[in-house]
Amino acid sequence: MEMMKRRPLVVANWKMNKLPSESSAYIKHIEKELIRYPDVISVLAGQDVLLPAMLKAAKETSVAIGAENMYWQEKGAFTGETSPAALEDLGVTYVIIGHSERRNYFRETNEMVNLKAIAAIAHRLIPIIAIDEPIVQGDDNDRSHWVVNQVIESLEGISAQQAQHVILAYEPTAAIGSGQPITPELAEFSLRRIRLTLADMYDWPTANAIRIMYGGSVKPNNALELMRQPDIDGVLVGDAALNPDTFLELCRLANEALLEKISQLDEI
């Protein structure tokens, strides 16, 4: 029953793609069709330079807009960074924090991710905290500790009440951009492990309230099986979401998976 309280999300991470005019056209293309899936939260995350155009196009639609990154300070001599205060003032709703590309290319640490998450919450932004699982030497326990430590360190200082408004996105590095997602069963195992960690950190009501997504080579041909899993509350999508029709199909599949879960509960 708890999973039914978690509305599924489909989050498009456009990365460093699209122009302002293209982002507006994309939103106009999808806005009417999304009305068919009112229980699915559709989020488009774009470069900072796109955000004003995206917000203007998304006004009076069900499309939510997110940033791909932010800094943790409100202002100061931090050339090239974007403050949470600026995102809040613009009207942005979500912000992706700690994506594996940020961790890899820009050496972001769990401590930095934590500072950003706290700053986002303070400015009424919903953080989507990415939890990666890199290709590391060792056994399953080593990889498990890596993921668990990321969850614990990323949420340090965040209360149970605040945590219920945080979204986690599990993204195994080997699957990102490879075209080869991990199996739905393995994804569910990993997300269940994260939820167990949240229960240890807080309590079960809090753990069951937090939405956890899967990211990594998500496409229409694998998204439904992924989102059918009990602990998977949506998908974080990269390249596939650059096409608006593909994004719409992913939203349709998220809605289908939700209806199946509701039907299964009705049969119990």
Image (cartoon, rainbow, N blue to C red):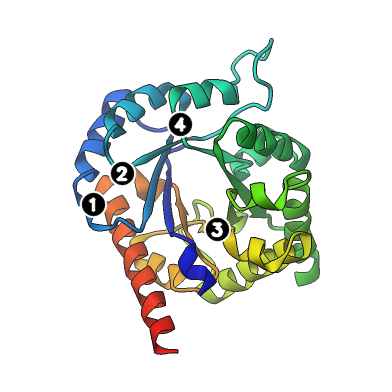
Q: Is residue 128 left or right of residue 90?
A: right
Taking the spot 58% from the left edge, 61% from the top edge, the residue there is: 209
Query: What separation in Å lies between label 2 and label 1 (alpha carbons)?
Result: 7 Å
Could you say where residue 98 lies in the image, as x and y percent from the top left? 64, 41
Say whether disc 1 or disc 3 marks the residue closer to the N-terminus.
1
Using the numbered discs, state the Cα–Cα distance from disc 3 to disc 4 in whole angstroms.
19 Å
Q: Quadrant of residue 197?
A: bottom right
Q: Are marks 3 and 2 in contact (CB under 8 Å)?
A: no
Task: Tell whether label 3 touches label 1 (CB within 8 Å).
Answer: no
For residue 27, say whether it is visible. yes
Residue 19 in sight from this viewpoint? no
Q: Which residue is mark 3?
A: 211
- Nearer to the camera, 260 or 138: 260
* Separation of residues labelled 4 and 1 (CA atoms): 21 Å
Label 2: how many residues lie within 10 Å, few (<14), some (14-19) or many (20+)?
some
The quadrant of the picture occupied by the C terminus is: bottom left
Whether residue 81 is situated above or below residue 112 in the rendered picture: above
The residue singled out by tag 2 in the image is: 62
The answer for how far apart the CA atoms under marks 2 and 4 are is 13 Å
**Secondary structure of residue under mark 1:** helix
In the depicted structure, whether residue 254 falls above or below residue 28: below
Q: Which residue is mark 1?
A: 35
Kind of residue at disc 4: Val
Q: Earlier in the sequence, mark 4 or mark 1?
A: 1
From the top left corner, tell me how far across and down residue 86 is, in percent: 53, 20
- Element at label 3: strand
Q: Which element carries disc 2, helix, strand or loop?
A: loop
The residue identified by callout 4 is: 92
Q: Upstream in the sequence, badge 3 or badge 2?
A: 2
Look at label 1 and name its amino acid.
Ile
**First in sequence: mark 2 or mark 4?**
2
